[in-house]
Amino acid sequence: MNKRNFSLLFVTLVAIDYKKHFSPYVVHALQVETKSNFVKPIFKLEVESDVEGPFINRRDALKSAKVSAASILASTLVWNSSTKSAEAQSSGLAEKLSKRDTSELKNSVFNIPPSAQKYPQFMRGTWDVSIKFNGYVFPSKTISKADITSNVSIPGFQKCSIAQIADVGRERTNYKMIIEAKTGLEDRSHNIRESVDAHLGGAYKAVENVSYDLSNPNRITIDFVRYQTRNAERIELFCNARESELITQQRSDASQREVFVCSEYIRQVTLGLSTEFGVARQAGGNYAHFWTWREPIPESDMKMTGNLLTAVYLDPQDALFFKEPAKPVAVYSHDIVASKTTG
């Protein structure tokens, strides 16, 4: 292999002592750099017997790593001159994603509390969702990859540090998603419970309760079954901003289909036990989900396809925060296929 074109970075991160109730894990990442920063890595958050299946070997990882940044971001949104926004916003979320530039995924500045997300007609109903890990990138130009990968507090490096994708590197996860037919609102309690349990293996019930009140759609509390995961006893989610846009896409056969893009900027506080009596361990993290959902078409067997980009930001208390205060230090990509069951 030509050393000028490829370089290998094998990262092994070992968790903080079990007594502090962080899950003992190993992040294995075999990264291959090409002209872009995107890779398809070995990226598995390994927690004792929770792990399913063997790691990919290095040779297979090299073969699968030949993916460009544009190809991963391209799956987010297919944009052309005939694509029109329902709200005719030339600088909206769809255009931001169409630029295929991770620097566009900046953290949101706090503003007026957002309202609950409403979903378009084609998304309403009950769906069997399959979400597949598609790769990651460390896009920062001011912080080295070594500094990023050695920082265990970055969301995604530990299980449950990003609630909705509780095991970021899990190859494929299946769960049920419900969007209310009449209101277009997501059944958040159900969907979060389903997603967390599925990402943590699905063999046992990890989530005890999800507290969500539509009168305050910007706060969610997830209580875990005691001792089922060492990473969290409770998670508090605070949504700081939301964006959404419905666009019409002109297809090559002159037909049209709708594409819905939406985002949610999250502050997550994870609480667990600590070694100090009467004091809970508390870990904070900041990230944003950027979803793309495409209307089902006959060629896809009427399955809804989509993509999820999760941009991760440094916490203001992090020593490196002022080196990258707004842009993401890591971006994870997942591909989604959903089959409608009812509605």
Image: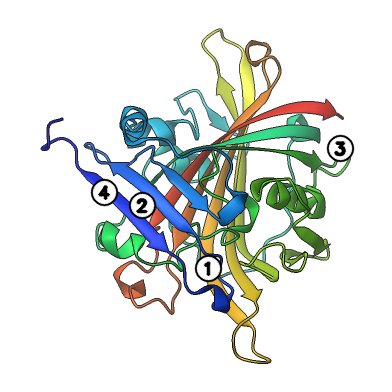
| Residue extending furthest toward the front | 49
Where 255 sits versus 99, above or below? above
Mark sitting on residue 9? 4
Residue on which the image places disc 3:
181
Alpha carbon separation for disc pair 4 and 3 = 47 Å
Question: Which one is earlier in the sequence, the residue at label 2 or at label 4?
Answer: 4
| Mark 4 Cα-neighbour bin, 10 Å: few <14, some 14–19, many ≥20 | few
Q: Indicate which label's residue lies in the foreground, 1 or 4.
A: 4
Alpha carbon separation for disc pair 3 and 1 = 33 Å
Question: Which one is earlier in the sequence, the residue at label 2 or at label 1?
Answer: 2
Alpha carbon separation for disc pair 2 and 4 = 23 Å
| Towards the viewer: 73 or 318 | 318
**Residue 5 image offset from top left, x and y in percent:** 15, 35
Residue type at mark 4: give it: Leu
| Towards the viewer: 4 or 22 | 22
| Towards the viewer: 25 or 294 | 25
